[in-house]
Amino acid sequence: MVAAGLVGGVVAGLAVGLVDGLSAAFGEGGDLGAIPLTICLTLPAALTIGFFLGLIRGAVASLLPAEDATLWALARRRPEIDAQLVSGLFAAGICALGQAAVVFAFALGPASGMARKENAAISTGLFAAAALIAMAALFLPLWRGLMPLARRVPRLGGRPAVATTLLVLLLAVGAACALVLSRIDWRVLRFGPYVTVLVLAVMSWWLGGLLTRWPPSRLVIAVLVLIGFGLPALAPALGQRANAVSAAQQRGLAAGLWIQLGRRLGDRDGDGFAGWFAGGDCDDTNPRIHPGAKDIPGNGIDENCVGGDAKRRERPRPTIVTGKGRGAKEPTKAAKPKPLAEGHNLLLVCIDTLRADVLGAAGHPDKLTPVIDRLASRGLYFTHAYSQAANTPQSFPSVFTSRYPPRVPYIKRFTGYPRLKKSAVTVFEVLQAKGFHTAAVSSHFYFTERRGIRQGFAEWDNRGATGIRDSNKDIAAPRIVPRAVAKMRALAQAKKRFALFVHLFEPHSTYVLHKGKGYPYTKRGVAGLRQKYDNEVRFVDEWLGKLLAGLKSAGVADKTVVALFSDHGEAFGEHRFYFHGQALYNEVLRVPLVIAAQKLPAKRIDQPVALIDLAPTLLTLLGVPIPSSFQGYSLLGLAQIPGATAPPATRSLGAALLRYPAWPKAQRAMLAGRYKVVRRVTENRWEIYDLKDDPREKKDLARRDPALAKRLRQQYARFIEDELE
């Protein structure tokens, strides 16, 4: 039986690996070398599955009488055994349903409210184990209690009743799955690895049964077993082809999982990166050398395995004067611009998770954002503004400190919500030191004192903040905006020059359904997901209108700079990712950025800019010196304001996805002119896109144009060593 299981596993592995390889070999980003690689990688899993299924088949056969070679035959011949099997299926189904119900209830309940995901995972696992023990204890009483019912199940067409029961249960499970998938955005789930394992198990069991009835010759068995154990030994050699590995990761069904497991097993120095399977570790004996390391310039060691050892370069020092950003030359007194908003207040609004393309001003056909569109029409509207991070806890510190995420001073980096060091200089600390009354209004669990993000605020109203679980269903704008309006009125009456930050959580997922004709929900799947998101955008835009109306009613609209941005965007499957925090594609990085003030011209600016430029721009506008720690540039020069300096035309922009427990895969990105480089550091994958010809980032040029790829990799190496890291 074990031999039949092994042989069945080998044949199943060859077939499934071939299908997986074909899916990785053809189409955009495919490579023929992925076919033998995926076959070799699939076989160990297939052999393991076949071996254990063979053991199970052998154990069952040993318990059966010789005349009943299978449970099927035994159930057909002996009605009492048939009834026992039916009762066992009923009992197992009830126990499985109960197990799933209690585990899901715990996962969606107490576990979802835990701030530390590792604690949530451990507690859910322990709860699942306890529930499994309870269900196992319940199985025997259920089995016995259901016997009277099981005896009544009819034997149709001469088949045992267990066949009818199994068919009904499978139909019930299928219907339940279909119902669940029809009500959720199922494309968020990645079925490839699960389907692959399921197909391997089914094929191995079926083939094992055939081989038990019609056993092949010993020579055939020996050859197949030799293939099953021999081919996987070729996987490390085949895995040295970076293109094949990249194709298997990107397009394969389960090959990415096998590669990830192989790299973990082959990581000799324990630094999280491997030297084989194109893992990118150029010295797998030294844990300080790997693709995620910081390269120390001039020491003769290429710590990050990119572009050789970093060169010592003199970085231009930021000029700490009004009107200039990082690296600008000191202008003459005659050229020094007078601040356009000297004496003004500041209202800085962040609408969380707002994509750049959802604005009517950006061409969205449904005109979801009339308030933002009017604001953009009377101020500086930056059409190509890029966030430097893909999620909230990495983006806000970057925006407030005007530093790329890897350069933000954190107490601890590898955590879901890193905390700023007190040494970090934020834009609100700078404004507070210049006499601004700094305040904030929000209602979200992130904005607590322990995050360090409150540095520089005299007061922060975060009342009504819920836990992680409840925040995803929270409608916060109706309680935030009235408090913010009241705060502006109070500060205006007290004649205090203020800098007020307001955070509006909508349209962050989970997208809440709103009542009224203006918020239709008629679609399902990804289209329904996007429809709910658009409704949230429409909803928050209306509340932004009430906030700006409150500014006017406070009598300070003409003396207040209004700046609007988003911390990151949102993905809807454009690159097989959903929501945010997992990738650095433009649907997540491109965000709205609008700055409006009475003396600012109305201008649409298409040059790419970064969110780290927001703080220097606001300081310049308000007549406040820019700290030397800020990496961003003032953007006023792009508006052709006399005397204002602009960022260098050849400037590159960057973004970083720092590893965190819920997504321990580091990524970096560089925007250089028309090209964008994405490096999946943990997976050692490179992607290059021509944003002029391919704005949706669908055609990866990393392997299509080797000369371009080499040049951009060299430029990327200089950029991360000089600016990003």
Image (spheres, rainbow, N blue to C red):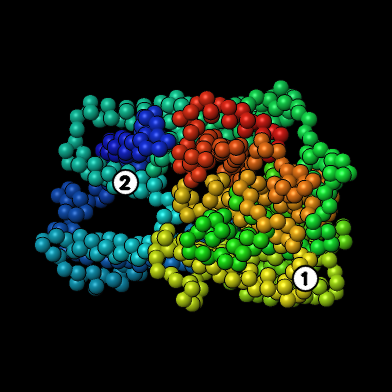
x, y percent for residue 310: 70, 27
x, y percent for residue 718: 67, 31
Identified at 31% across, 72% down, the residue is 145
Q: Amino acid at mark 2?
A: Val
**Foreground residue among 552 and 101:** 552
Report the residue marked by disc 2: 199
x, y percent for residue 263: 51, 35
Q: Amino acid at mark 1?
A: Val
Is 22 placed left or right of 83 in the picture? right
Query: Where does the N terminus fall, quadrant-wise?
Result: top left
Q: Quadrant of residue 243?
A: top left
Report the residue marked by disc 1: 556
Question: In terms of secondary structure, where does tag 2 sit?
Answer: helix
Identified at 69% across, 33% down, the residue is 721
x, y percent for residue 584: 56, 46
Alpha-carbon distance for marks 2 and 1?
A: 66 Å
**Foreground residue among 553 and 477:** 553
Is 192 placed left or right of 663 in the picture? left
Query: Where does the C terminus fall, quadrant-wise?
Result: top right
Q: Is residue 716 above or below residue 407?
A: above
